Image (tube, rainbow, N blue to C red):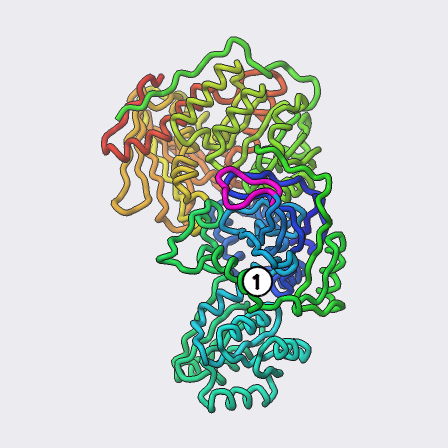
Amino acid sequence: MKQVVQNYKSGELALLDVPVPGCKPGGVLVRSAFSLISTGTELMKVSEAGMSMLGKARSRPDQVAKVVQSVAANGVPATYRKVMGKLDSYTPLGYSLCGVVEQVGAGIDDVKAGDLVACAGNEHALHAELNWVPKNLYVPVPDGVAARHAAFGTVGSIALQGVRQGESRLGEVALVIGLGLIGQLVTQLLNASGVRVVGVDPDPARCELAERLGAAACGDPGSASVESAVVELTGGMGVDQVYLAAGGSSNQPVELAARLCRDRGRVIDIGKCRLDLPWNAYYEKELDVRFSRSYGPGRYDPEYELQGRDYPIGYVRWTERRNLACFLDLIARGSVDVEPLVSHVADFEDAVETYRRLEEGELKAVAVLFRYTPASDDAPAAEAPQVTVPEVPRPSGRTGAARRSGPVRLAFVGAGNYASSMLLPHLTGRDGVELSTVVTTTALSAANAQRKFGFGKATTDLDAVLGDPAVDAVFVVTRHSSHAELTRRALLAGKAVFVEKPLALTEEELAGVLAAVEESGNDRIQVGFNRRFAPLLREAKERFGVRGGPASLRYLVNAGRLEHGSWYLRQDTEGSRFAGEGGHFVDTASWLLDADPVSVYAAAPAGGEDLQIVLGYPDGSTATISYVTSGPASFPKETLDLIADNKVLRLDDFVRAAVHDGRRRQWVGSRLPKARDKGQNAELAAFVKAVRTGGPMPVPLESLAATTTATLAVRTALASGVPVTLAGAR
């Protein structure tokens, strides 16, 4: 299928061939009929992409701050790869469309195939022939509403949410600054609410259009006619509310708002304009400044948008979905007329040329629609206080363990940030490796990975990959909740599997993976516990030498706080944060101590997220893992001390290491910090070698199972408050 994309690094716009998205549970697959270009938001994004790197940095200081933090935590090389990987990727455009339901996912009962729906979301209502849309981001289109008009649903909801924030009342007077697409819709919504409107815009054509659609008077922001109209309509008191629907770097809108607003009036920011508030003017009138967040409550809440959890109507009357339905109802009843706003309708095949004409000013427009051809031959993808350490099966024959004469052919399931920045760069161009297929649930991410890393094929069809005899090994690099099931399926398909941590989020999931090993006879599995492969740590362990007695290990993990909305925080579906990444640290400790843990104790400060975990080992050694989220970002992420036999191994964040032997300190390599290397490259080399030669996997399956069990036992230890014995541990 086709999708409009842009490369944020180069600014290139393209109509790209991408795989058809899969129809996941909790949503519907929609074939687009019309999608709407937001001539404000989208053209601003297109313009930013064409800036120099310095210009991009100046326009997004928030992202620059994140880069600085990443450098402190991960070093310059890893941060550079991550940033350039994001920049040099295709990003989607679009967020408002109308289309026909093509396929219904599990759990959906309010629409059926063939229904017309309006869709929202900058990840789900894209300029693409097909989109997967979750339940709370689509609504059925009322009878009598044309598809081209229903495509305005999202931008209409943005305008509607702004009007709700203004709390307009019958008989009031409002000033709308900026008569682009949003401003025109705000004007109509206010007029329908019994509010008289004065509009402001430097474009005479837009002023004339707003007056045709109900505004009492409109004019240029610098003209006296606007102020005269306000005086006449309000008796000189000033308007009750001002809606900032303009963009740009000028501070004129907020200054004009202060001058024309009445005492204790309301100023609502809907657009993205400069907000350098003149203090005296806003203070003396005690103006109420409000922000309108996109299309309503639920926006930026992943539980609402992705998991379909609605807000109770008794507490939140107007949500994203209810705003969307309300706006379509207003169109159906004739209270809002969007047809006069349609400046141009372009065939979807002409999308790139349409953007060029808009950006260069050749096409003057309030609203532009893309019109899609009827359904083609694109077919939707198929839907696709004692813990027992599970006994690891010992298959009599190892499926897929034969030596290979040709290149090892790899398939990636998932191609997100970690795969793109930490794994694929080490595999691209590696001798004896062929990147065969990339499969993702979203079409564009698969196409991006194919373009950047040279995969032979990109698809959303997992079954086709697992059934492909040409694929030797499958990399599972998806969200945590899917790891165990995808690993199980790949093992049953006879593939060698590299699964990024965690292997499983529950004991039942781990048992399912081991059952697949026993059923298939295929034990060719590696979990992405890369730290044991880090060159600096391996050399330090070798210098430390063989222990003669028990050891004490201290591992401080300065994990830091996650951003609001991070999927790591979705404990109900993705498990706890420690369950997701704690296996890294358990595995590293066990590798350094040359044994698997036999007990786990865990404690957490009251009301805090920090964890103190103590692992016991068969020879009396202990490993204390301090997993903290309250530390400063400026402090190293990982520091480790191993103490035994009057010696200390010290590791500082994988950039420096030393061994103290009681007499002197021996630096590993040199005392100068090295480039941070957490072992991904060496780990991948070991995995590829094992697949190619048919030799043992880099880490025994018994160790992978023991590490996973110990990591999951932390939850049990926290709940019980006493140490948990790992029954059956070696």
381 shown above or below 605: above
Q: Mark 1 points at which residue?
A: 332
Q: Is there any visible trace of residue 8 in the rendered image?
A: yes
The answer to whether residue 679 is above or below residue 59 is above
Residue drawn at 71 percent across, 33 percent down: 456
Q: Which residue is drawn at 55% across and 90% down?
A: 228
Within-10-Å neighbours for mark 1: few <14, some 14–19, many 20+: some
Main SS of the magenta segment?
loop
Left or right side of 204 for 613: left
Quarter of the figure that contains the N terminus: top right
Q: Where does residue 392 sit, x and y in percent of width and height? A: 43, 16
The residue positioned 46% from the left and 45% from the top of the image is 307
Residue 52 seen? no
Q: Is residue 156 left or right of residue 291?
A: right
> Is residue 273 shown above or below 49?
below
Q: Residue furthest top?
A: 396
> Relative to 464, does residue 143 appear above or below in the rendering?
below
Question: Where does residue 21 sit, x and y in percent of width and height?
Answer: 62, 41
Q: Nearer the viewer, residue 211 or 294?
A: 211
Q: Count how many numbered circles sit on residues in the image.
A: 1
Image: magenta residue range: 101-113
Residue 282 placement, left or right of 204:
left
Q: Which corner quadrant of the image does residue 219 belong to?
A: bottom right
Q: Which of 387 and 243 is in front in this view?
A: 243
Which image quarter holds the C terminus?
A: top left
